[in-house]
Amino acid sequence: MTTTASLPTYIDATMMATFRQCPRKFFTEFCLNLRPARLSIDLHAGACFASAIENLYTHYYGKAGTVGVDFDTALARTHGQFLDQWGDFVANKPTPKSRENVWRAVETYFANWRPETDPIQPFDKTGGGAFEFTFAIPLPTADHTGGFPRHPNGEPFLFAGRFDLLGLWQDRPIIRDEKTTTSIGAQWADQWRLRSQFMGYVWACQQSGIQLDTVCIRGIGILMKEIKLAEAFKTYGPSRIERWYQQFQRDLWRLTKCWNEGYFDYNFADACTSYGGCPFMDLCESDHPERWYDQYERRNWNPTQKNPIAVETPEGRAA
């Protein structure tokens, strides 16, 4: 095992999806913390959009010690924050997710779901409101009920993540999460039926004492000439949550075994070329992958942040 690698103590849905797709990619991305030198427009645009939604809610409802403002004032303040967060970012690929289009998506979103008439209201509007939900839950280890492996440091792994809103819908708790995309087709809603990310969110809420089983996913299609909206409600009952939980255990044991053996398997299949291609193909083709490390930056993955790779590690560019 290379001395520059470390196994994170936290695990989230993105990390597990990457491991299931390709263990070697998981090692490179989350143990070596290597990232392409240019940040992804999808992550940046998604983070700016999510922040704008949260900021408008905070201005509109107020936060601890402050009183909310009217919608137009809240939107104007949010726009200023959005421009600051976007900064001088330039996309690393041709994309309709320009600064202007992403802001247009924010305006379109609130034209359709204004805070005062949105059927999903914040779970708690006092003291700043539950406008997002962040969690880091210790996973029960093998000597307790549940049987997850311990981290090599002897402590439990933490199942971590965040979603956009803990809300109330028809007087019952619900999770709401926004997804920006460049395409919303006829099958858009089907992709969430067995989505590990949302089953994990439901489990995390239940572990926190919030009894819910439903997720509202809002799709925001940012196209070159228009913004398309979609909405899907998915319910994850006890049997599906148990199936997710058991699979999570099995996969985390397998991940820990890879670490302990010092070897993470390669995929050598579709994972290498799907979605525009894996950014680490040069490493996997090379007899000396470490010679490619200086082509990447080191950025820790923080699953509790809107932009989980916004902060570089102290090493910065890999050496």
Image (tube, rainbow, N blue to C red):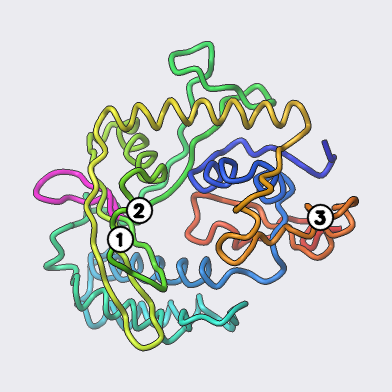
Vertical comparison of 189 with 19: above or below: below
**Is 94 left or right of 31, judged from the image as shown?**
left
| Image coordinates for residue 130, horizontal then vertical, percent | 29, 52
Residue lying at 30% horizontally and 60% vertically, measured from the top left:
187
- Report the residue marked by disc 2: 191
Could you tell me how far apart the alpha carbons at marks 2 and 3 are, in whole angstroms?
Answer: 32 Å
- Report the residue marked by disc 1: 187
Secondary structure of the residue carrying tag 3 is: helix
Kindly indicate whether the residue at mark 3 contacts the one at mark 2 (C-beta within 8 angstroms). no
Observer able to see residue 124: no
In front of the other: 95 or 210: 95
Residue lying at 57% horizontally and 51% vertically, measured from the top left:
302
Vertical comparison of 312 with 100: above or below: above
Observer able to see residue 127: yes
- Report the residue marked by disc 3: 285
Secondary structure of the residue carrying tag 1 is: loop
Residues packed near mark 1 inside 10 Å, few (<14), some (14 to 19) or many (20 plus): few
Could you tell me how far apart the alpha carbons at marks 2 and 1 are, in whole angstroms?
Answer: 7 Å
Q: In the image, what residue type sits under mark 3? A: Glu
Residues packed near mark 2 inside 10 Å, few (<14), some (14 to 19) or many (20 plus): few
**Is 285 left or right of 63, judged from the image as shown?**
right
